Image (spheres, grey):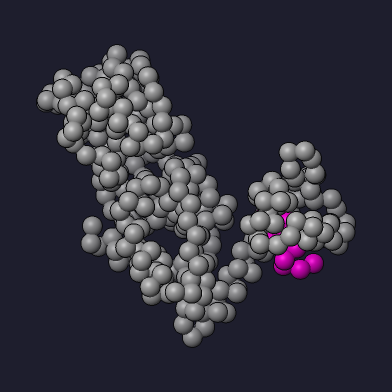
Amino acid sequence: MRFEQLRYLEAALRTGSFRQAAKELDISQPTITNQVQRLEEDLGVVLVVRGAKGVRPTYAAERILPHVVAAVQAEHLMREEASAIGGLKLGTVRLGTVPAGSQTILPGVVKRLLSDFPNVRFEVEEGPSRMVSRGVLSGHFDVGLVTRLAGIDLIPAEQALLHHVDLISGRLVLAVPENHRLATKDGFEASDLEGEPLIFPAETSILRTAFEQLLDGIEARIVYATNNAEASQNMVRAGVGICMANTLLSSTVSGNGVALVPLPFEWAHARISAIVRNDEARTSAVQAFLGLLRESAKNF
C-alpha cells in the first residue's frame, strides 16, 4: 500500500469519476484505475463499483474512507511541514469563500500571500456559506470564509466541529424600490411584508434561512429566486419586488432606483468569519494565510 494509491482512491470517490480524479491529480486515467485495483488486491476487498454514471464506494470503502482521508491529509501536512523547515518555502492553501469574502477582505490578503510567499499554491472556490462549511469539514478546503448570522447555524453541531475567527462585520437589510412605502416608513415590522412580492435567495444561501425566519407566520409571495445578489438588486430596481441583502456585498447600495431598509433584529448582524476544522493540525501555509486575514481585518 502506498500513499499515492490512497490519494487516487480518495479523489475517485470524492469526484465520483476516475476521469475527473485523473484530471484533478494530473495523471492518466489508466494509471489511477490500475493503482486503485492494486489497492483492492492488497486489501483483499472491492472498493469501488463502476457504472455508467461513474464510480461509487462499496460498503468496505465507506468503512475505510475516513481513514483514507486522514492518511491523505497527514501526508499533505507532513510534506508541507518538511518543506517549511527553515522558512515557508512552499505549500498549498485551499480556500472556499462566499462572494462577500472575494469582494472585501480577500483581494489584499491574496496579494500579500502571493507576494510574501511566492511558492505557495493558492486554490479558491466560491459558493454559499453552507457549501463552504461542508467543504472545510470534508477536508476539501483548508480554510473557509463564510457569512455568519447570530443564532443561525450553517451546519448541525457547527460550534463543536468548526473553529471560527470573526473578521469583518456588516448587516442585513431589505432592498426595496425607492418609491416603495417601506423606503420612508419608520419602524419596520415583519408584518409589513404581508402580500409583498419577494425575491428569494436560493435554498443553499444563509440569507434564505434568514428570510424564512423573518417571514415566520407570514404568507410569503415569492415571485423570483436567485443566488446572484446583483441579479436580485436589478429585480428590485425594475420594481419586481423586495429582496434581502448583505451590506458586505458591493452590490448592496442605495440609489439608482433602490432604497435600503435596515432590519432591526439581532440576527441581522452579519459577519464574515474564517473557519477551520477544530480537530485538524494546520500547515505553515494555512497558518500564514490565517495570520494575514487577521491582520487585514484590523483595517476594516
Instruction: Report x, y in % for residue 61.
Output: 76, 50
The residue sitting at 30% across, 21% down in the picture is 240
Residue 192: quarter of image: top left
- Asked if one can make out residue 52 in the rendered structure from this viewpoint, the answer is yes
Residue range highlighted in magenta = 1-11
Name the residue located 44 percent from the left edge and 42 percent from the top edge: 128
- The answer to whether residue 159 shows anywhere in this view is no
287 within the magenta span: no
Q: Report the residue at 57% width, 79% height from top.
A: 82
User: Looking at the image, is 269 positioned above or below residue 119?
Assistant: above
Q: Nearer the viewer, residue 35 or 240?
A: 240
In this rendering, position of residue 70 left or right of residue 6:
left
Main SS category, magenta section: helix
Q: If the image is split into quadrants, where does the C terminus sit? A: bottom left
Give how far across and how far down residue 231 sits, in percent: 35, 33
Q: Position of residue 132 (x, y in %)?
A: 48, 48
Residue 130 drawn above or below residue 68: above
Residue at image coords 75%, 56%: 29
In which quadrant of the rendered view does residue 37 lie?
Answer: bottom right
Q: Quadrant of the N terminus?
A: bottom right
- Does the magenta run of residues contain 6? yes
Rendered position, 153 above or below 183:
below
Q: Splitting the image into 4 quarters, where does residue 58 fall?
A: top right
